[in-house]
Image: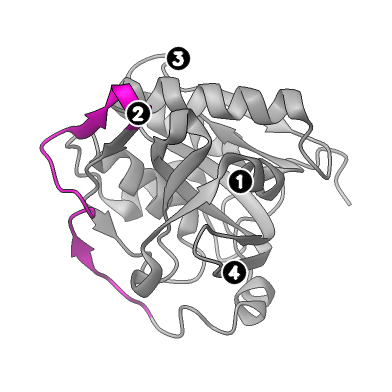
Amino acid sequence: MRTDILRKTALTAAGLAFTGGAIAAPVTAVYAADKPTTSATADRKHGERELGVRYEAQPNFYYCGPAAARNALSVQGKDINVDAMAKQMGTTEAGTNSINDITPVLNKETGKDVYRSVEIREPKADDKQTDKLRADVVKTVDEGRAVVANIAGTATDTDGNTHSFEGGHYISVVGYRDGGQTVKIADSADPDQASYWMTTEALADWIATRGYTA
């Protein structure tokens, strides 16, 4: 096992099998976010903001890293070829190694040092790490950008649905509400579950042993 626990594969075939084959074949779907806007919808009084996403599902089981980055950049009106990003990230059938391979690609399209990688090395996020994630999501979304996170394991959304990626996965965080207590996720794995809400605490534990970029 590598000593750097952040550098784990993104979405392996074994991980896909665990999910019940959410992506049985290449799938591509493009549609607007639940609240389509040219930039974002916001209600600062109630502490919520949601970015408009031009969602696209990943075309194969190992492209979750490039697809998450592509969906994240779409909130800024950027349309980046997912194959080109995969090449820049060094993505193979084993996935994309870590969030540290995502950050430089986002910065190439957004600006030098705009995105920075944040690691949660422990198997469970503590209060300080959860608070930082919450603050980073609010700040990044308020600036009109999406967060990209490397997650692993199983998490439950606010509707009670479970999302399992034991081999690892990448997602985009494109909105928040309740002052950042709850976040909206754009997930490239399955267009039938393209987006869902999750508590920030649950997301932090989902990211644990890996990292995110904001």
| Alpha carbon distance from label 4 to label 3 | 34 Å
Kindly indicate whether the residue at mark 4 contacts the one at mark 1 (C-beta within 8 angstroms). Answer: no
In the rendered image, residue 39 lying in the magenta stretch gets the answer yes
Of the two numbered discs 3 and 1 on the same chain, state the one appearing first in sequence.
3
Circle 3 Cα neighbour tier, 10 Å, few/some/many (<14 / 14–19 / ≥20): few
The amino acid type of the residue labelled 3 equals Asp
Residue range in magenta is 26-48
Q: Position of residue 166 (x, y in %)?
A: 70, 66
Kindly indicate whether the residue at mark 1 contacts the one at mark 3 (C-beta within 8 angstroms). Answer: no
Could you tell whether 33 is left or right of 213 in the image? left
Whether residue 87 can be seen here: no
Q: Nearer the viewer, residue 65 or 38?
A: 38
Of the two numbered discs 4 and 2 on the same chain, state the one appearing first in sequence.
2
Q: Position of residue 205 (x, y in %)?
A: 71, 45
Kindly indicate whether the residue at mark 3 contacts the one at mark 2 (C-beta within 8 angstroms). Answer: no
| Alpha carbon distance from label 3 to label 1 | 24 Å
| Alpha carbon distance from label 4 to label 2 | 27 Å
| Alpha carbon distance from label 2 to label 3 | 30 Å
Considering the numbered disc 4 on the image, is that residue within a helix, a strand or a loop?
strand
Of the two numbered discs 1 and 4 on the same chain, state the one appearing first in sequence.
4
Tag 4 residue:
162
In the rendered image, residue 24 lying in the magenta stretch gets the answer no
Q: Based on the displayed image, in which of its 4 quarters is residue 192 positioned?
A: bottom left
Of the two numbered discs 2 and 3 on the same chain, state the one appearing first in sequence.
2
